Image: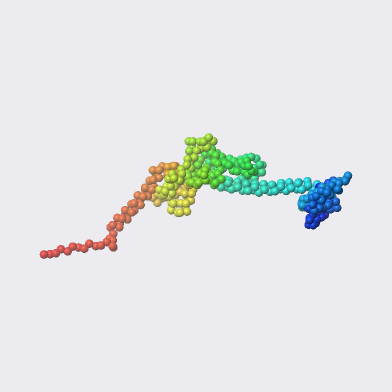
């Protein structure tokens, strides 16, 4: 059905009026542009078809359409924003089809944009809570817009644990697009740790879990340093459990990753009890004690204050769940063996015992107000 754009409004008004009167079909010329003067309306499809047969001539013939379809097409033209005062000839059927495709495309783009923004936020949150901060927004957007099947982002930095060093870390963040949707996922990150003493670099790939149990970058560094990390994990069945993790540097899997030893909650390691075997000043303050334990659970080498014989000294400690103890280092990071670390507790115990003995002796020499006095025996003279 052809129309002239400047006839759209008049024909639409006429069709709406006829529809309100109960007419359901319209017959329009096929070769000439339809307008309010050459379009007829009928109540039944048979009447419309009869008009098409009778009205045919050498110049043109007619075709019938449902009046609702005609009104919808004319309304689409009115709402399209084209110049209705021009004398442009329009194929109404084709115009409606193209308008529908354009609308669908716009909706798809809108949905894609919404999905991309949701996906971007999801990836940003994953990076943030895995310890990579909020510095990759631009790179994420650029790579997602390219639409590649997968992409990588590189991250480099100097890692330390409150101790001056130059441990260089290079991290390769791996992202992959879903096979079913356009959503991207943060699948894993590969760490290359180069120690300052120029030892061979250590490498390990850490995989991202969607249940909040992923190993963070700092935890990954601590594991690669040989320390232990405490994590709440989940079984394949989704059941939660707690475990200490530690790398077994003597064994690797087929991918070259170090195998991880697990010391489960039933293994019997009590971090708090291990700490309390030492005279650590921070244990006397609940908040400091809580912070200390949380730091050790993350695998950190934590600075503490030892108090021996009333003298304070800076030490470093780390959790050792494998042997159910605590590793202690002096201020120069020299390991203090287990026997030496016990001496400070023993020394404190001896001093306490001595003070208690001295106090007991003093108390034994002083007369007690509650102690009954012995009566003198009287001798009877005969």
**Residue 40 in view, yes or no:** yes
The spot of residue 368 in percent (x, y) is: 28, 61
Residue 81 picture location, percent across and down: 78, 51
In front: 100, or 117? 100
Residue at image point 39% right, 47% down: 344
Frontmost residue, 12 versus 149: 12
Residue at image position (44%, 42%) is: 322
Say whether residue 296 is left or right of residue 376.
right
User: Between residues 49 and 322, which one lies in front from this camera angle?
Assistant: 49
Total numbered labels placed on residues in the image: 0
- Residue 291 percent coordinates (x, y): 48, 51
**Does residue 331 appear in this view?**
no
> Who is closer to the viewer here, 346 or 112?
112
- The quarter of the picture where the C terminus appears is bottom left
User: In the orientation shown, which residue stands out farthest toward the top?
Assistant: 254
Residue farthest left in this picture: 382
Task: Say how the picture is coloured.
Answer: rainbow
Residue lying furthest right: 58
Give how far across and how far down residue 200 sits, in percent. Answer: 52, 35
At 38% across and 48% down in the image, what residue appears? 345
Q: Quadrant of residue 266?
A: top left
**Left or right placement of residue 53 versus residue 322 in this view:** right
């Amino acid at each position: 059905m052809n129309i002239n754009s400047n006839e759209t409004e008049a024909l639409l008004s006429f069709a709406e009026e006829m529809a309100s009167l109960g007419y359901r079909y319209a017959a329009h010329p096929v070769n000439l542009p339809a307008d309010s003067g050459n379009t007829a309306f009928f109540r039944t499809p048979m009447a419309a078809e009869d008009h098409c047969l009778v009205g045919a001539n050498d110049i043109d013939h007619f075709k019938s359409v449902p009046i609702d379809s005609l009104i919808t097409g004319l309304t689409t033209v009115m709402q399209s924003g084209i110049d209705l005062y021009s004398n442009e000839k329009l194929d109404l059927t084709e115009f409606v089809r193209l308008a529908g495709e354009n609308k669908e495309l716009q909706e798809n783009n809108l949905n894609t944009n919404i999905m991309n923004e949701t996906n971007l936020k999801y990836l940003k949150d994953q990076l943030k809570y895995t310890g990579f901060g909020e510095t990759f927004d631009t790179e994420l957007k650029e790579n997602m817009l390219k639409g590649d099947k997968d992409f990588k982002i590189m991250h480099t930095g100097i890692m330390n644990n409150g101790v001056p060093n130059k441990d260089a870390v290079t991290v390769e963040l791996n992202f992959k697009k879903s096979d079913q949707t356009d959503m991207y996922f943060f699948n894993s990150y590969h760490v290359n740790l180069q120690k300052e003493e120029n030892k061979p670099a250590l490498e390990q790939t850490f995989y991202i879990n969607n249940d909040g149990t992923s190993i963070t970058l700092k935890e990954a560094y601590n594991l690669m340093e040989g320390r232990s990390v405490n994590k709440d994990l989940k079984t394949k069945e989704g059941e939660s459990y707690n475990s200490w993790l530690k790398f077994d540097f003597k064994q690797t899997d087929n991918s070259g990753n170090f195998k991880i030893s697990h010391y489960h909650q039933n293994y019997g390691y009590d971090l708090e009890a291990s700490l309390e075997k030492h005279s650590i000043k921070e244990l006397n303050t609940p908040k400091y004690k809580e912070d200390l334990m949380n730091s050790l659970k993350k695998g950190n080498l934590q600075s503490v204050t030892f108090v021996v014989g009333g003298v304070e000294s800076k030490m470093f400690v780390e959790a050792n769940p494998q042997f159910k103890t605590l590793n202690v280092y002096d201020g120069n990071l020299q390991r203090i063996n287990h026997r030496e670390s016990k001496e400070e507790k023993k020394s404190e115990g001896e001093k306490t015992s001595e003070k208690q003995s001295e106090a007991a002796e003093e108390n034994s020499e002083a007369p007690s107000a509650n102690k009954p006095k012995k009566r003198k025996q009287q001798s009877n003279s005969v």
